Image: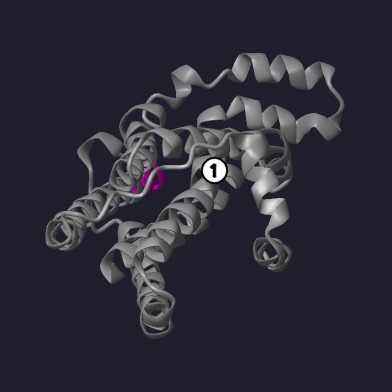
Amino acid sequence: MLIIYALIVFNYSILKTTKDTLVMTAKASGAGTIPFIKVWVLMPMTLFVTYLYTKIANKFRREQIFYIMMSLFVGFFALFAFVLYPFQNFIHPHQLADTLQSYLPSGAQGLIAMLRNWSFTLFYVMAELWGTTIMTVLFWGFANEVTSVSDAKRYYAILGVGANIATMLAGEAIGYLSSGSLVLPFYEGDSWGQSLSLISLVIVLSGTASMFLFRYINHSFFSHEMKSNPLKPEPEKVRMGMRKNFAYLARSRYLIYIAIIV
C-alpha cells in the first residue's frame, strides 16, 4: 500500500507542476486563464466526477472501482500524449478564437484562451482532479476501509514519509525529462512537447503500475481473509444517490468537522 500511495503522490507532484506551465505558455494564454478554467470547467467537472463516482460505487466492488477510475485518468493522459498534443494545431480552434477576441472585451481573453487551447484546459482539469479523486477519495477510501483505527496510528505516518520521498523523486524526474537527455525523433525542434509527452508517459506507466500493485494486494492478502472466513457474509452495499449522500454527510458531526478543516 505504501508503494501505491507513493506512485499516486509521484504523479500528483508531477501534474501539479506541469499543468500551470502548460496553460500559461499556451498560445494567447497566460496566468489569467487559470481562474476561468477553475470556475467554468473545473467546478462542473468536479461535480460530474463526484456523480460518476457515486454511480460506480453503487454498482461495483471496491477493486473494480479502483480500476475503473484509475483507467479513466490514465487513459486520458495516454490520449493527451499520443493524440491531443501532437495534433493540437488541427484540433485547436485558433481561427474561431481570433474572431471571438476581435468582438469580445479584453477581460474575456482568459475565457477565449481556455476555449482556444481546450485540450490543455482538459489536461489542467484532469491534473487537478487527480489530487481530489485518485489521491484523496480513491486511495484514502481504500486505506480507511482496510485499516483499523489502531493500525492507522502506526502505518499512516509511514505513508506520509513515502509521500515526501515520492515528491522529491518527482522533482528529479521532471528535471531529467526536461533536460533533453531523452530524444524522441518525432518531436524534433519541440523540446517542450517532447518533455510533456515523456511526462505524460511516465504518469501512464506509474498509474498502470499502481493498478497492478492494487490487484496484487487484493488477491494476495484480502482474498486470503475471505477464504479463512468463508462463513462471514459480504457486507451489503448501501446504494445512495447524490441527495442521500449529502443528507448523510449533513447528519454526521464528525464529517462536518472534517469538511470545515478541508
Q: In which quarter of the image is residue 9?
A: bottom left
Q: In which quarter of the image is the C terminus?
A: bottom right
- Determine the residue located farthest toward the bottom in the rendered image: 154
Callout count: 1
Whether residue 28 appears in this view of the structure is no
Q: Name the residue under label 1.
A: 124
Relative vertical location of residue 127 with respect to residue 88 in this rendering, above or below: below
Residue visible at 47% across and 42% down in the picture: 238
Residue 44 picture location, percent across and down: 65, 33
Q: Give the range drawn in magenta.
A: 190-196
Whether residue 47 appears in this view of the structure is yes
Give the camera-side residue of 188 and 164.
Answer: 164
Give the camera-side residue of 229 and 193.
Answer: 229
- Determine the residue located farthest toward the front in the rendered image: 231
Question: Tag 1's secondary structure?
Answer: helix
Residue 16 picture location, percent across and down: 51, 57
Q: Is residue 238 left or right of residue 229?
A: right
Relative vertical location of residue 241 with respect to residue 16 in this rendering, above or below: above
Check if residue 246 falls in the magenta segment: no
Q: Quadrant of the N terminus?
A: bottom left
Residue 151 picture location, percent across and down: 36, 80
Count neighbours of disc 1 (C-alpha within 10 A) and say few if under 14, some if 14 to 19, many if 20 or more.
many
Residue visible at 58% across and 34% down in the picture: 241
Q: In which quarter of the image is residue 190?
A: top left
Residue visible at 38% across and 75% down in the picture: 159
Q: Is residue 159 left or right of residue 206?
A: right
Residue 193 picture location, percent across and down: 39, 41
